[in-house]
Amino acid sequence: MSMALAAALLVALDVPPSPIRDDEDVVFYPTYGRQIAGGTRWALVVHGRIFEPEGDSLKRAAALGLMWRLLGLSREQAETARFKQRARAFLVDNERGKAMAIRLGETIHPAGTSGPDGHFAATIELPGDEVERLRAAAPGDGDWIAFEAVTRPGDRRRFAGRVRRIGPEGLSVISDVDDTIKVTEVHDRAALLANTFLREFRPVEGMAEVYRSWARSGAVFHYVSASPWQLYGPLSEFVETQGFPAGTFHLKPFRLKDASAIEFVTSQQDHKNRLIEGILRDFPRRRFVLVGDSGEQDPEVYGAVARRHPSQIVRILIRRAPGPARAPDRFERAFAGVPKNKWSVFDDPDPLCGEALTPGGGAFIDSSPP
């Protein structure tokens, strides 16, 4: 599509010209689309963020100093290349009040207006036949539909995003990230900070193979975490390079000016509950497997979700993460009222590659308390 034609479409659709300036960047997060109106239409969710990266300025240096002191890191740690790289996403100028637009196929759609944190979101409704055409045109995995931001004439940058088309029935895996698929050591504050900002992300051994085996059987994945959206870049790279199946991401809003201590790398029970409830509400006929770990509140969160949605939750799998000893009856209390054949606690993920992911499956998993 030519720049002139794109501009004409913007006018015809009453979509304002692109607000993305030359010194601003846009990132889109992988989302999903679902059937509505009795299956005749689809609702595709678009979610992204617009921001201006901070250059090497006095302002950026001051913000970087505030951040490493807030985290309790040493000056030597703050000078490492990896810390500066991971911290960069927290030190940008978020752009608010920007009316965004995307190009989906040959059509331009409004994509929401950015808020104080730079985030924008919109739900785009399309007829089923149009979604099928977009799916057929998609390279590789046709369940993912690609789009891109509308930029200014002459701006040759491409800000790409994608949305996964998910049917109303089937199996979905809602997976935690920290200490479930990525080694974080949340129980140890110093190790948590080092694993988040100073070290290369390391996978929990064996989990990628398990998830790939489930994906081959048709499961789709949602990565739900209390990690902040600023860590999406390294987290998505980790998921891809370590061979985990592609999935949608659902992280936590965070602004450095509102922070206290390490709030942004700690779990929040209400936050995860809201994210999971939204996914279950959007797919009432799908079956769900919840995968987490014992390091924080996953057993309690998942147990509560399973009690509220007994027909949708078919399995809960909890990795026994290293850390302080837990009360012997913790899991029994967390999963009170949940049938025992629906939940399991495991140490070694390897046998899960043969898991049928149905109630009563995976009898090889030790469900007894530690």
Image (cartoon, rainbow, N blue to C red):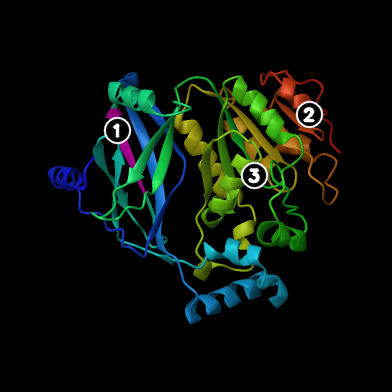
Whether tag 2 and tag 3 are in contact, CB under 8 A, the answer is no
Q: Sequence-wise, which precedes: disc 1 or disc 2? A: 1
Q: Report if residue 333 is visible in the image.
A: yes
Start-end of magenta stretch:
121-126
Task: Give the vertical position of 150 relative to 335 (above or below).
Answer: below
Instruction: Based on the picture, tell me whether residue 350 belongs to the magenta stretch.
Output: no
Instruction: Give the SS element for disc 2.
Output: helix
Image mark for residue 225: none
Spatial CA span between label 1 and label 3: 30 Å
Instruction: Based on the picture, tell me whether residue 122 belongs to the magenta stretch.
Output: yes
Q: Residue at x 56, y 67 (%)?
A: 259
Q: Residue at x 58, y 46 (%)?
A: 237
Q: Sequence-wise, which precedes: disc 1 or disc 3? A: 1
Quarter holding the N terminus? Answer: top left
Image mark for residue 125: 1
126 sits left or right of 258 in the view: left
Instruction: Give the SS element for disc 3.
Output: loop
At label 3, the amino acid type is Val
Image mark for residue 350: 2
Tell me where residue 50 sits by quadrant.
bottom left
Q: Residues within 10 Å of mark 2 (few under 14, many from 20)?
A: some
Q: Report if residue 74 is visible in the image.
A: no
Q: Residues within 10 Å of mark 3 (few under 14, many from 20)?
A: many
Task: Give the vertical position of 299 relative to 168 (above or below).
Answer: below
Quarter holding the C terminus? Answer: top right
Mark 3 — residue? 177
Query: Residue 89 in the image: x percent, y percent?
Result: 52, 61
Q: Main secondary structure of the magenta part?
A: strand
At label 2, the amino acid type is Asp
Query: Residue 365 in the image: x percent, y percent?
Result: 80, 26
Spatial CA span between label 1 and label 2: 41 Å
